[in-house]
Image: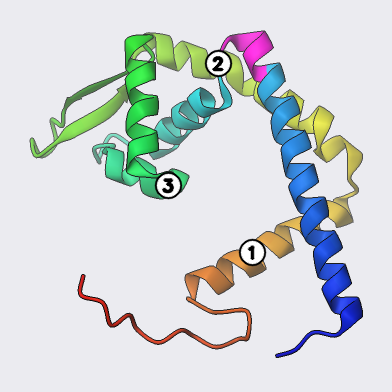
Amino acid sequence: MTRSRPQDEAASRAWTAYRRLRLLVDTEVARDLERDTGLSMADYDVLDAVVAMSDGEHCIRVHGLTARMNWTHSRLSRQLGRMERRGLITRQPCELDGRGDDVVLTEAGRQARAQAAPVHLASIHRHFTEALSTQQLEALAGIEQAVVRRRSAGGRSDGTTPPPSSEPS
């Protein structure tokens, strides 16, 4: 499918706006979080993901965290190492099945996340949601859903699905 020149220009402006907005908001939220809690954005993201995944019925393994956070294994492993050295998390044998290590928040990690959550939410509000109308927020959520649906379906920009990979797994 070929785009017209106005569509190409609109797409370029939208992409530039998305990148600028993402960098601006991420920078401001990270700055507030670091200043007010001493946590990096990466620290908070990991703590938040572990809390979200904690149900007491499943072990929280690095593999599961990488999938949830959409991070590479090496990035997450390095981050977990830094957080473990600072006493925010620990890795323990999983008591549920004994097959691997469970990523567990320490008491310091739980307290850090609990103290950081309201700071994080207030910063998001101040630097992002406060500036937008309900309609704009709903439009943005709809855009995210459309992109995720296409990615989940394996679709391409031309609306087709790529052929299965011929490479051995």
Q: Position of residue 167 (x, y in %)?
A: 26, 77
* Colouring style: rainbow
Residue 72, visible in the rendered structure: yes
User: Tag 1: Cα neighbours inside 10 Å, few (<14), some, or many (≥20)?
Assistant: few
Residue 142 versus residue 57: which sits nearer the camera?
Answer: 142
The number of numbered discs placed on residues in the rendered structure image is: 3
Q: Position of residue 76 (x, y in %)?
A: 37, 34
Q: Which residue does the image show at 35% across and 84% down from the upper left?
A: 164
Asked if residue 80 is among those painted magenta in the image, a careful observer would answer no
In space, the residues marked 3 and 2 are separated at their CA atoms by 20 Å
Quarter of the image for residue 129 reads top right
Q: Position of residue 48 (x, y in %)?
A: 49, 31
The magenta span reads 33-39
Q: Which residue does the image show at 32% across and 16% down from the upper left?
A: 84
Residue 56 versus residue 156: which sits nearer the camera?
Answer: 156
Q: Which residue does the image show at 40% across and 32% down from the upper left?
A: 50
Q: Amino acid at mark 2?
A: Leu
Q: What secondary structure is the stretch in magenta mostly built from?
A: helix
Q: Which residue is mark 1?
A: 145
Quarter of the image for residue 145 reads bottom right
Which label sits on residue 39?
2
Q: Is residue 119 above or below residue 2?
A: above
Which type of secondary structure does the marked residue at label 1 adopt? Answer: helix
Residue 59 versus residue 87: which sits nearer the camera?
Answer: 87
Q: Quadrant of the C terminus?
A: bottom left
Q: Amino acid at mark 1?
A: Gln
Q: Return the residue found at the far left.
A: 98
Q: Are marks 3 and 1 in contact (CB under 8 Å)?
A: no
Q: Nearer the viewer, mark 1 or mark 2?
A: 2
Q: Which residue is mark 3?
A: 68
